[in-house]
Image: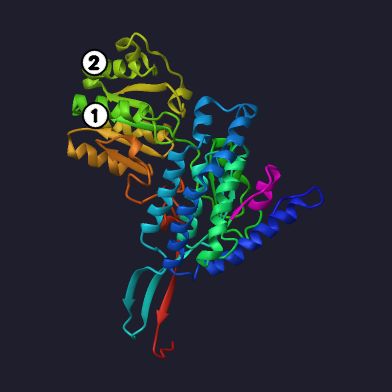
Amino acid sequence: MAVTVEQDLKEYCLEVAQRAQAASRQLGVLTGAVKNDWLRRSAAELLRQTERLLEENARDLEAAPDFGLTEAQADRLKLSPERIADIAQGLQQVAMLPNPIGEIMQSSVRPNGLDVQKVRVPLGVIFFIYESRPNVTADAAALCVKSGNAVILRGGKEAAHSSRAIVQVLNQVAAAAGMPAHAVQLVSTTDRAAVGHFLALDQYINLAIPRGGEGLIRRVAAEARMPVIKHFSGNCHVYVDRNADPQMALQITVNSKCQRMGVCNAAESLLIHADVADNLLPPIAAALGEQGIELRGDAKVQELIAQAVAADEQDYRAEFLGPIMSVRVVDSLEDAIELINRYGSGHTDAIVTCDLAAARRFAEAVDSAAVMINASTRFNDGGEFGLGAEIGISTDKFHARGPCGLNELTSYKYVAYGNGQVR
């Protein structure tokens, strides 16, 4: 439904939210078989309509320069037959995941014979705001619906034609699969004011999930009347301990930083123990230099690495999302832990060590959503953690933390079975 000049934007947002709530009540009692059938049919239909999807995507790509997209952003926006096949495969993979709804999480029989069960249930309606990547449209819809939730999608204007085409396919299939018509809705206006209207509708929307730049996430967190799953930034660390294997330290640091720089689980800060800095930092720095990484460090780092420039306080807090990394030499494991907890964003932090006691101390003391022991920070990902897929990564501590898959999009209720008990 398109917003016209005559139609009040606030009223439009209210209608979308009300339709989503009605759909969520139907979704909550659908069987896993119905939802899986919709996912599989949608995957097949996306493949069948590849040409139309490419035509709509071409319209977005043509307008990309007008939005000032970088080459990397334009590449993420671009669809190809292979990428559409990947989107379809993603829906198939979600269909193969266990249905979380109705799972008995705990059960106990009380002394009076009352059988008390803790049962997994949907959250209800999810408002998802995300960047201009067409595949995210399908991924988010699949995860929300599989977990029994209706979803309101607010994608970036740069991918408007691509996202609309994908959602049209999902909705075309819904009726044939026995799904409620408004289980997946795409906001049809690019007016930024619409976001504020949706964030005020807590009587209809149960959860907001922003996925994008820090400015967007802070706006949503400030304005939302419903709970928000979020992370503001990803200042992730690699700490090279005094007992680290040199080759492992080099490989993990380079992979954490360079495998993909513009993502939230890429390492932005390197800490290295003073006992091994003289021997290990130069080869690590050389390997990073081959990848075009600028190092910003303290006095000791500059002494060891001629190309390093002086770091300031902000550099140790920064999420660079590009070819810059802060580096610091520390005197102890405890100093590393303290610095990570002070400057980090609670996202992902790694230790490289052969000392099991040091690894355990790091894991228990570093206050982050994910702690990696002798592994790259890039593994903090729903697929890599075996969740099948994710809708985002949370650095919150309430309800969901780390990669948010199907289970993180659910709540629970208690169901008690009796045979006439009274109190």
Query: What residue do we see at 37% from left, 17% from top?
Result: 298
Residue 330 x, y percent position in the rendering:
30, 24
Residue at x 63%, y 47% (from the top left corner): 223
Q: Residue at x 41, y 40 (%)?
A: 346
Q: Position of residue 420 (x, y in %)?
A: 41, 91
Going by the numbered disc 1, the residue's amino acid type is Asp
Q: Magenta span covers which residues?
A: 185-199
Establish if 99 lies above or below 238.
below
> Crowding near pointer 2: few (<14 within 10 Å), some, many (20+)?
some
> Label 2, label 1: how many angstroms apart (C-alpha)?
13 Å
The answer to whether 13 is drawn above or below residue 340 in the figure is below
Where's the N terminus, which quadrant? bottom right
- Label 1: which secondary element: loop
Residue holding disc 2: 278
Q: Amino acid at mark 2?
A: Asp
Front position in the image: 413 or 357: 413
Compared across the picture, whether 291 is left or right of 131 comes to: left
Mark 2 and mark 1 lie on one chain; the one further toward the N terminus is 1
- Image-quadrant location for residue 290: top left
Residue situated in front as seen by the camera: 332 or 314: 314
Residue 394 seen in the current view: no
- In this orientation, which residue lies closer to the viewer: 325 or 338? 325
Instruction: Give the numbered dot on residue 241.
Output: 1
User: Is disc 2 in contact with disc 1, using a CB cutoff of under 8 Å?
Assistant: no
